[in-house]
Image (cartoon, coloured by chain):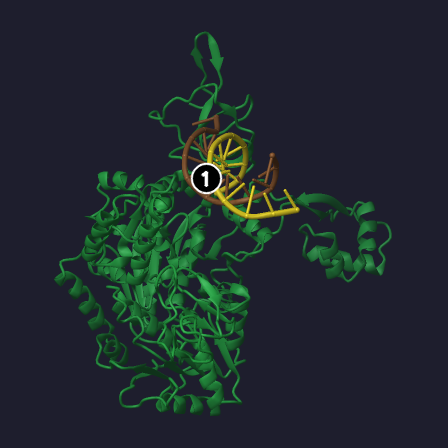
Chain colours: A green, B yellow, C brown
Amino acid sequence: MVGDSKKSGGMTTGQVVPVLVPLPVPGPYSYAVPEGMDVTPGAIVQVPVGPRQVPGLVWDADDTAGAVDPVKLRPITQAFDCPPIDATMRRFIDWVAAWTLTPPGLVARMVLRVPAAFDPEPRVPALQPMLETKPERLTPARRRVFELIEDNPGAWTKSGLAHAAGVSTSVIDGLVKAGTFKPVMLPPPAVVPDPDTGRKRPELSGDQAEAAETLRHAVGTDCYSATLIDGVTGSGKTEVYFEAVAAALDKGKQALILLPEIALTATFLERFHDRFGARPAEWHSDMAPKMREKVWRQVAEGRVRVVAGARSALFLPFRDLGLIVIDEEHDQAYKQDERVFYNARDMAVVRAHLGDLPIVLASATPSIESRVNAEAGRYGAVRLASRFGEAAMPDLRTIDMRKHPPARGGFLSPVLLEAVGRAIERGEQALLFLNRRGYAPLTLCRVCGHRFQCPNCSAWLVEHRFRQQMQCHHCGHAEKVPEACPQCGTLDHLAACGPGVERLVEEVVQHFPDARTVMLSSDMPGGAKRLRLELDAIAKGEADIVIGTQLVAKGHHFPKMTVVGVVDADIGLTNGDPRAAERTFQLLHQVTGRAGRTGEASHGLIQTYQPEHPVMAALVSGDRERFYEREIGERQRAGLPPFGRLAALIISGEDKAETEKYARSLRAAAPRSDDIDVLGPAEAPLALIRGRYRYRLLIHGDRKSDIQAYIRSVLSAGPKARGSLRVQVDVDPQSFL
DNA sequence: AGCACGCCGACT
DNA sequence: GTCGGCGTGCTC
């Protein structure tokens, strides 16, 4: 096929290839291959699109593709000197595109996101010792250089050599002139050193060793398998899957560890370093462009052996991937809900299947769908039942707020305050968890009863006292905090109702004025980098009391944290999300699991008005099995699959009453809000024809309130919203493999 | 996704 | 009289 020229009408036409371009068009475009250029599917090229040049991916020839008007045909501008995107990755791009109803070019764009990496990294100048040629005059400085290179006869950089030998660079220059060194150009240094799999084999307990063996075996078979490691916090999941990573590396393969962005901390990287003597390459959103470029290139070349990354790392062009690990498998952060809507956990399973390689899903609180897959035998299952070493499970108790109410104007029960006080007296740390940003979730006027509401979504506006703003957490609307009530004009009679983390700080400082109190919230200035620094500082003991939203729940280990208080455990249980119990259980389990890694006596205190609720009962008793059984059972009783897909179809611009009626029926029929897709009028029929959806419904968002807000906004926006409708697909990977 | 073209409101 | 809003359409 390559190099094939067709005769047509006596004219010789050059080779034409399909190329995926980063445009929302349904398929690849055709380009002419210039004389002398050699491109095969997977090659990364530069092509003209209208007035600009864009990166493109040479696609597999498809006989069904219609011929393009030869007049339109333009030549490929350039073929990069870059490893091609392999066939598995190309099928993966197609797969993700079809599944998420995204144009394939936009999925390809996620793979080709680092244009600077398409050209080879420049080689670096170095000096190769020529040991046989000794200079005539051997000065003391020259002798030091010789002693060094006799032990290390490889090539050196000039400054590296001068530094290591303790001489100035002019000594080296002299030796170069004398012929002792030959200047050479070397490949640039690896972005991370190679991991050493034999470096420190961990001592594993019985069930850990068994689990590690299971995973090693899976890696050894060299074919697709999915294994769920279900192990409580501190049970050594990480150590166990590190053994799978080691096994993949020993086979000469690369490994990918996916983590929720927030869990990519120095702590994790250090644990990896302890085991392998080197850090993994990182991949996440706030990397320096230069580093991003190097990592991408070296992953493609196979020089980087292990990547630890956030969800987008799934689209790195590994040369020879041998294992994928998804830590915190249940985490919502794996869902991307912009541009290309995908769940990295699910797409990772697809990637593993297409590449015929093993995947490991790990969580202390697996998602229902993964549990069901494990129980049905579609996933292998590994249980790690107990904490490792002396580390005890934290002692969890509920605080019945009806019996131990907070002081007037406060939100912390005396029982919790006392526990916090004792912890800091002992020089330990306490964490107060409240999953609510801002100062207060509702503000009202004490004179006229006016409540501050979002003009777009009708949700309550949340006061952010620190920023002096009233914010809508649904749509991002923000306004200044007014001095007077906008309805009746009365000054100074606005009342904040309910607690947010900012308000908790006030209460804590009042009770513990001398403690070092830190508040962490996702809207903190400074972004992810600052956050990582703060979390690492806390882990080192540089705070006494930490007040945080759910970002403190994820993947951090605070060895001195011996008291964890959940301030309002009932948040989220009543928001109408059919997954509310599962979510709350996962969140509270993760939060309370922050305590007690060191084996100190540690306590989790859960403030609730419903201590008898199954979520609280499961947390306190530690009986996770019963909880999962109950959740799965509930769904079965409701006649629903434990997971599944729904499509929602909103046709904006139709008769409003009709659309509303439709939306109502959809909403009523939607059992699980987060498995619902929003399809634009263009895509939806196609998806429905393909039989991709169980129900002809749709909605968008993770919570009922989001969905309602979304439907309202679509309805009120009318035809304008047509083009903005997006697809969200949340699927169980097993349903299509 | 960009970027151009194209048709209706407030300004130097 | 123009600058500028974003609706529509096109890119091999």
Q: In which quarter of the view is residue A685 placed?
A: top left
Question: How many numbered circles does the render carry?
Answer: 1
Residue designated by label 1: A85
Residue type marked 1? Ile
Q: Position of residue A347 (x, y in %)?
A: 35, 50
Determine the secondary structure under disc 1. loop
A365 is higher (above) or lower (below) than A412 = above
Using residue A54 as the reference point, say whether residue A167 is left or right of it: right
Using residue A188 as the reference point, say whether residue A374 is left or right of it: left
**Residue at the image position 39 percent from the left and 41 percent from the top:** A93
Q: Is residue A250 visible?
A: no
Q: Position of residue A146 (x, y in %)?
A: 76, 56
Using residue A347 as the reference point, say whether residue A582 is left or right of it: left
Q: Is residue A482 visible?
A: yes
A248 is higher (above) or lower (below) than A536 = above
Quadrant containing the N terminus of chain A is top left
- Residue in front for this viewpoint, C12 or A273: C12
Chain containing the residue with disc 1: A
Q: Position of residue A4 (x, y in %)?
A: 45, 19
- Residue in front for this viewpoint, A189 or A458: A458
- Residue in front for this viewpoint, A414 or A595: A414
- Residue in front for this viewpoint, A88 or A357: A88
Q: Decide: few, some or many residues near mark 1? Use Cα within 10 Å; few <14, some 14-19, many ≥20.
A: many
**Residue at the image position 42 percent from the left and 88 percent from the top:** A420
Q: Position of residue A414 (x, y in %)?
A: 37, 91
